[in-house]
């Protein structure tokens, strides 16, 4: 895509991370705990740490300790680095999607999935309200939504098979099918 592109999120630390596009290659558990306790000292570093250095990418869901197979902080750093060129021209905004007014745009939404854990420290997400707003936006825009399920008046346009990082009680990574939806 080219032209003006906007990205918004209700997590101000995530937005700060993408604006800064910088991160450490390694992090100790003590550093992780310090950043967790001092979130506002460096919001960009907090965003990177909260997602990239946490177990399964879950917002401060526990320090992701490196092992022989995986270096969590380095992997998150490399992932951010790989995205740098493709996202450098995006305008990142800390804002609630409900405050956005758009017309004649292509919109991609990746909301908190229904029945999943949401970010700590952000308002409770109302999925029913979200889908109503997507219906409204779809009148004047092309709207694509990522979710596991959608209301009946939305059609699945693509299915993507994934595995979660979190293991179940049998220590198996569960298969998931993420889907892209549009209003019929």
Image (cartoon, grey):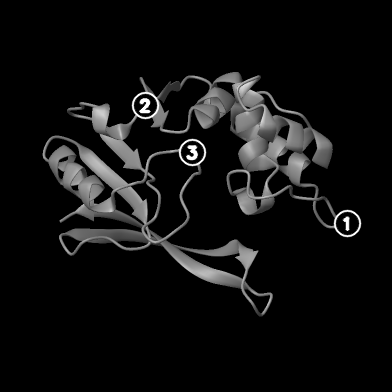
Which circle's residue, 2 or 3, is located before the other in the chain? 2
Q: Residue at x 15, y 60 (%)?
A: 153
Q: Looking at the image, which is closer to me, 28 or 76?
A: 28
Which circle's residue, 3 or 1, is located before the other in the chain? 1
Q: Residue at x 80, y 47 (%)?
A: 71
Q: Quadrant of residue 46?
A: top right
Q: Residue at x 25, y 27 (%)?
A: 99
For label 2, the SS is loop
Say left or right for 35 vs 51.
right
Q: What quarter of the picture does the C terminus occupy?
A: bottom left
In this view, the mark in front (1 or 2): 2
Against 1, residue 75 (above or below) is below
The residue under label 3 is: 121
Residue furthest out toward the front: 37
Total numbered labels: 3
Label placed on residue 68: 1
Where residue 4 appears, as percent x and y from the top left, is: 36, 20
Where residue 6 appears, as percent x and y from the top left, is: 38, 25
Against 177, residue 23 (above or below) is above
């Amino acid at each position: 895509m080219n032209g003006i592109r906007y990205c918004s999120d209700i997590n101000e630390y995530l937005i700060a991370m993408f604006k800064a596009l910088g991160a450490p290659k390694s992090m100790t558990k003590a550093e992780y705990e310090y950043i967790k306790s001092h979130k506002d000292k460096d919001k960009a570093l907090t965003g990177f740490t909260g997602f990239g250095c946490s177990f399964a990418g879950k917002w401060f869901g526990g320090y992701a300790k490196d092992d022989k197979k995986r270096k969590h902080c380095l992997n998150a750093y490399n992932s951010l680095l790989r995205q740098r060129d493709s996202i450098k021209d995006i305008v990142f905004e800390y804002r609630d999607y409900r405050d956005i007014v758009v017309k004649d745009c292509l919109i991609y939404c990746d909301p908190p999935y229904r029945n999943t854990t949401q970010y700590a420290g952000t308002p409770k997400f109302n999925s029913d309200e979200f889908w109503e707003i997507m219906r409204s936006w779809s009148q004047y825009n092309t709207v694509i939504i990522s979710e596991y399920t959608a209301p009946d008046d939305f059609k699945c346009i693509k299915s993507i098979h994934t595995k979660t990082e979190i293991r179940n009680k049998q220590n198996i990574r569960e298969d998931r099918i993420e889907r892209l939806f549009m209003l019929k």
